[in-house]
Amino acid sequence: MVESIVRIAPAKVNLALHVTRRREDGLHDLESLVVFAALADEIEAVPAEVDSLTIVGPFAEGLGAGRANLVARAVAAFRARWPDAVPTGFALRLTKNLPIAAGIGGGSADAAAALRLMVSQSRHAIPVSELSDMAARLGADVPACLVSAPLLARGVGELLEPLADFPALHIVLVNPMVPLVTADVFRRLRAHDNYPLPALPAPLIRPVQLGIWLAETRNDLQPPAVKLVPVIGKIVDDLAQTQGCMLARMSGSGATVFGLFGSSGQAHQAAQMMRAQNPEHWVAAAPLLVPGG
């Protein structure tokens, strides 16, 4: 029996996101505190003569598996840069467990998982800096998803500062199943030169430290996203009122809302309440991934 190789693509959550500058190329400089949840898509690879991709899972519908798919592009880019590193092809099977166009990494996390898979099978060492540069060319979120641990991201997402410490927390994610296009959110953004994130406490080891810091931050993309999809604002309000919720806010460019909790019990109770109120929404609870975890 051929042994398969499996890599996960954890959900990426922006706990805070400040838009600090609109650049001459039309992109935006950001500052963001990024974490990852123990909720993930999954890539399974089996050696084959040539590379191929199939997509399954609850959110596979409508996703093309051709060369334009970000996973296929990541594998092709790796082989073009290091043609002798991985001699065999792979039949790749992507299981989409996370909603798409949801502000939680999605295709970027999948592409990063594919790159990690290729690195794990390489016959020689792959320089981290070159891999990160390749990831950035695939998409702004791909370098952070390569790390998949708490970090500060700056620039368009390519300047990363992994955090040595982070408190153990649990998260609830709620998505109203309304896709939200990032470009549409940025088009409605009024201020493009907001102040940067405050300095993080060091060491950052207690939930209360994080809670105090987060109170001084924002997601600058939340107000325009709420104008496009008003239910996002209602989800934020409802989740904020659940017992033990430290903070409720939209992640990234939406439409997923997160709530932070100090215990698994509080998170799962909040998730049950949100499911009961809106059974058509996607709701999940999980611990956050911590440095070295």
Image: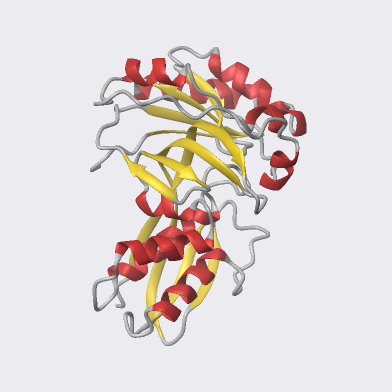
Q: Is residue 39 above or below residue 284?
A: below
Quadrant that contains the C terminus: top left
Pick the residue in front: 185 or 263: 185
Visible in this render: residue 124?
Answer: yes
Q: Which colour scheme is used?
A: secondary structure
Q: In this view, does 266 lie above or below 144?
A: above
Residue name at image x 48 percent, y 61 percent: 111
Pick the residue in front: 125 or 261: 125
| Residue 31 drawn at (x, y percent) | 49, 37
Q: In this view, does 64 lie above or below 280?
A: below
Q: On the image, which quarter does residue 241 sit in?
A: top right
Q: On the image, which quarter does residue 237 sit in?
A: top right
Residue name at image x 67 percent, y 23 percent: 233
Q: Is residue 61 left or right of residue 196?
A: right
Residue name at image x 56 percent, y 20 percent: 239
Residue name at image x 57 percent, y 29 percent: 219
Which residue is most to the front? 24
| Residue 84 drawn at (x, y percent) | 33, 85
Which residue is most to the bottom? 49
